[in-house]
Image (spheres, rainbow, N blue to C red):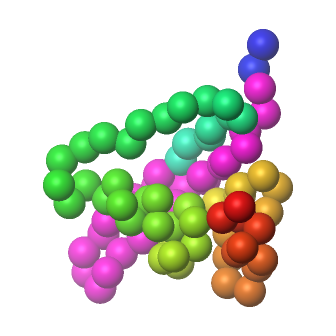
């Protein structure tokens, strides 16, 4: 049985100038699921996590945590809790 996603990342893109760090990244994490983000240095792991908790703004795409979109002006304290 598939559980609904508590965290949903859909087609997220993040670039710093001409340097693309995240390019069309998507993932769903179900409640209670443990996920590890692994990869080489500079692959965008920290940037993805910073975008998920609202510390960095993503350029395109959508991030939703427990039904709350991660976007400027949203209740980020709720997302982080």
Most common secondary structure along the magenta stretch: strand
Residue at 25 percent across and 75 percent down: it is 19
Q: Quadrant of residue 71?
A: bottom right
Q: Please identify the quadrant where the N terminus is shown.
A: top right
Is residue 60 visible to the viewer in this orientation of the structure? no
Residue 11: name its quadrant: bottom right
Residue 36 can be seen, yes or no:
yes
Give the side of residue 14 with respect to residue 20, left or right: right
Q: Is residue 43 above or below residue 36?
A: below
Identify which residue, 34 or 2, lies in the foreground.
Answer: 34
61 in the magenta segment: no
Residue extending furthest toward the right: 67
Is 16 colored magenta in this rendering? yes
> Residue 69: percent from the left, percent from the top?
74, 66
Q: Position of residue 74 (x, y in %)?
A: 76, 79
Residue 76's place in the image compared with 17, above or below, is: above
Q: Is residue 11 above or below residue 60?
A: above
Give the farthest residue toward the top: 1
Q: Position of residue 59 (x, y in %)?
A: 51, 76
Q: Is residue 77 positioned above or below 62 on the image?
A: below
Residue range (magenta): 3-25
Find the residue positioned furthest to the front: 81
Q: Is 43 on the left or on the right of 24, as rendered?
A: left
The residue shown at (46%, 59%) is 49
- Residue 25 is situated, as x and y percent measured from the top left of the image, at 47, 52
Taking the spot 42% from the left edge, 37% from the top edge, the residue there is 36
- Relative placement, left or right, of 40 versus 76 is left
């Amino acid at each position: 049985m598939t559980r609904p996603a508590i965290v949903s990342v859909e087609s997220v893109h993040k670039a710093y100038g001409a340097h693309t760090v995240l390019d069309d990244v998507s993932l769903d994490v179900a409640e209670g699921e443990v996920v590890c983000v692994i990869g080489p240095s500079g692959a965008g792991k920290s940037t993805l996590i910073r975008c998920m908790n609202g510390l960095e703004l993503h350029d395109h795409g959508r991030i939703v945590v427990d039904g709350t979109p991660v976007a400027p002006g949203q209740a980020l304290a709720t997302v982080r809790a």
